[in-house]
């Protein structure tokens, strides 16, 4: 399919300039010659290169940014909560490491934190199944969402998956039912739910953690009905047309905010969230906390009613006009 | 067999459609080889239905029910915003009338050409199912060949009783996707109705010819329960 990550490839030239600047800085200190002019020139080059490379990203480039191996993962967000006690297992079959979940304190308030977790290196990726959740993982989510709802703890989720696990065992263990009942539990929850899409939000496997009263999305995250490759394979029988699919799917944060499918975009530094993960994580958690505090003032009935109306509204159909049965326009 | 053939097979004769005036828009302005509206016009002509599901109120052996029947001939039965809206209207109407709801599924999943609007119909239909069931009402789904993706992972698997037709292919991921992922061929039985029954995912496998009598028997249990609950009060 796609060879390497287009963003990672693009960063190589930038890293070379970065290394030369740092070498010159060392030389400036250690040697009697003054390299300040060279350093300034290189810094200028670096900045213009960075703007040129990352100033405006195409949808496909954003897909690659969302999959960047250094991009902050759910655990990078969860570990910055005031406290976190991880809980494990679906009580039936196994514990799915692609889901990290447990009690946490968010700016002093007890919450249930739930995230999809991909690996940060090959070894961890194998253990966490590249963030693709199995039915056991979704059943863990459902169980803990239910506990949170009963105890009155707001639910905060972090979405980062290419999609639900498409393996034999997942089908044997009823992946469809596991996702469906996750959606059901979130629909019914009596507590505020705030979802943050931090990387890739792929298909129903992402939505299983995505039914929420308020949805935050990182600027370069993507959220789509299917992965770009999946969409290309489904429609055109050719996964290599992923770039074309990405441009058609309207999967960027700006598109989805315009559609009313997400509520807030948290900006990323030039070059992506991994260039300054500390700030990005703090900004997202700040937005989550503000929203949780606002929603926590509503009663369970008000929350459920507002959530129902919110999803009830999402549509793009039109009512037939009398005698107008031609192909529908926009 | 299109959706109306199936409705005629199940319903006594009276059928009032719900949401037939809800027709697709083109929220993404989708174009590939053809524009989305041109594709839809072709589907309408080919299938004889106006969208991927036909919904309405009718009687089955005297029981008034809300019935939805999906049609695979229309865009592979995919769920876009019209399917989502019609299913939601159906469940809301069933809730209002306090009658059972039966949905016959056939779907390749969410509709790509409507992007995230399509995915969100999983959320919307689920919310409608939850409200309907919370009111103590009976929900049955009948899974026909094939039922996958966004439909299987939402209302299809949220019912009280799940029936599937013999040999129907039912699963989350399509067979081709799994084979490409694991790089091996799957056994023929994989993801069939019989396979799902054995693994505890569905309640029964019922042949098309026995479907009506089976549904009626199931409706009788729920009706008896409700009638007695009424007397107890």
Image (spheres, rainbow, N blue to C red):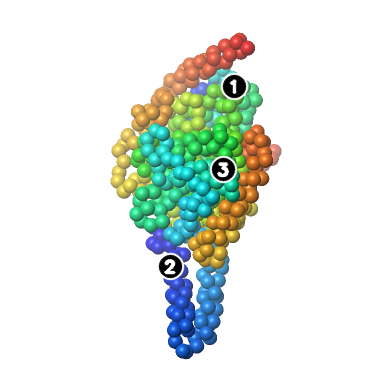
Within-10-Å neighbours for mark 2: few <14, some 14–19, many 20+: few
Tell me whether circle 1 and circle 3 mark residues in contact (CB < 8 Å).
Answer: no
Within-10-Å neighbours for mark 3: few <14, some 14–19, many 20+: some
**Residue A110's mark?**
3
Q: Nearer the viewer, residue A180 or B92?
A: A180
> Does label 3 lie on the same chain as label 1?
no
**Residue B99's mark?**
1
Q: CA distance from mark 1 to mark 2?
A: 59 Å
Q: Secondary structure at mark 1?
A: loop
Place of residue B179 in the rendered image (x, y in percent of width and height, measured from the top left): 34, 45
Q: What residue occupies the far bottom of the structure in this picture?
A: A33
Q: Residue at the spot x=46%, y=44% of the render?
A: A86
Place of residue A189 in the rendered image (x, y in percent of width and height, measured from the top left): 57, 36
Q: Residue at the spot x=42%, y=49% of the render?
A: A131
Asked whether the viewer can see residue A254, the reply is yes
Q: Secondary structure at mark 2?
A: helix
Place of residue A293 in the rendered image (x, y in percent of width and height, measured from the top left): 64, 45
Q: What residue occupies the far top of the structure in this picture?
A: B231
């Amino acid at each position: 399919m796609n060879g390497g990550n287009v963003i990672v490839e693009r960063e190589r030239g930038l890293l070379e300039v970065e290394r030369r600047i740092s070498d010159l800085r060392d030389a400036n200190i250690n040697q009697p010659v003054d390299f300040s002019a060279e350093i300034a020139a290189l810094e200028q080059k670096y900045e213009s290169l960075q703007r040129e490379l990352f100033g405006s990203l195409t949808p496909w480039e954003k897909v690659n940014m969302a999959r960047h191996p250094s991009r902050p993962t759910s655990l990078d967000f969860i570990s910055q909560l005031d406290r976190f006690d991880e809980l494990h297992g679906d009580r039936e079959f196994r514990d799915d490491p692609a889901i990290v979940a447990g009690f946490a304190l968010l700016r002093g308030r007890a919450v249930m934190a739930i995230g999809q977790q991909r690996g940060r290196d090959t070894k961890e990726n194998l253990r966490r199944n590249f963030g693709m959740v199995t039915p056991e993982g979704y059943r863990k989510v459902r169980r803990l969402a239910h506990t949170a709802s009963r105890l009155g703890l707001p639910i905060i989720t972090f979405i980062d998956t290419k999609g639900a696990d498409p393996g034999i065992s997942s089908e044997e263990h009823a992946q469809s039912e596991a996702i469906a009942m996750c959606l059901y539990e979130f629909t019914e929850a009596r507590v505020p739910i705030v979802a943050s899409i931090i990387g890739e939000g792929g298909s129903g496997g992402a939505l299983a953690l995505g039914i929420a009263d308020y949805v935050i999305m990182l600027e370069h995250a993507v959220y789509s009905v299917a992965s770009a490759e999946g969409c290309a394979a489904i429609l055109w029988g050719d996964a290599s047309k992923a770039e074309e699919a990405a441009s058609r799917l309207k999967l960027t944060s700006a598109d989805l905010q315009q559609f009313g499918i997400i509520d807030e975009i948290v900006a990323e530094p030039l070059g992506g969230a991994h260039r300054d993960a500390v700030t990005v994580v703090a900004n997202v958690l700040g937005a989550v906390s503000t929203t949780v505090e606002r929603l926590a003032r509503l009663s369970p009935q008000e929350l459920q009613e507002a959530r129902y109306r919110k999803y009830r509204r999402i549509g793009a159909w039109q009512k037939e006009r009398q005698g107008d049965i031609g192909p529908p326009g926009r | 067999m299109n959706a109306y053939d199936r409705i005629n097979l199940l319903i006594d004769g009276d059928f009032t459609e719900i949401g037939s005036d809800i027709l697709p828009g083109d929220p993404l302005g989708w174009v590939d080889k053809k524009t989305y509206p041109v594709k839809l016009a072709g589907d309408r002509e080919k299938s004889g239905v106006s969208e991927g599901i036909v919904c309405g109120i009718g009687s089955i052996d005297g029981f008034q029910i809300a019935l939805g029947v999906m049609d695979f001939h229309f865009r592979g039965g995919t769920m876009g915003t019209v399917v989502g809206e019609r299913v939601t209207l159906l469940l809301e109407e069933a809730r209002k009338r306090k009658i059972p709801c039966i949905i016959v599924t056939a779907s390749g999943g969410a509709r790509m050409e409507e992007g995230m609007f399509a995915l969100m119909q999983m959320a919307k239909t689920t919310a409608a199912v939850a409200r309907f069931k919370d009111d103590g009402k009976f929900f049955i789904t009948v899974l026909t060949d094939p039922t996958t993706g966004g439909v299987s992972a939402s209302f299809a698997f949220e019912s009280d009783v799940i029936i599937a037709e013999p040999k129907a292919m039912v699963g989350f991921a399509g067979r081709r996707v799994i084979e490409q992922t694991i790089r091996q061929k799957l056994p023929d039985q994989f993801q069939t109705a019989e396979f799902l029954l054995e693994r505890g995912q569905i309640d029964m496998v019922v042949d098309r010819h026995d479907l009506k009598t089976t549904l009626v028997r199931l409706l009788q249990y729920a009706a008896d329960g409700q009638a007695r609950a009424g007397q107890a009060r």
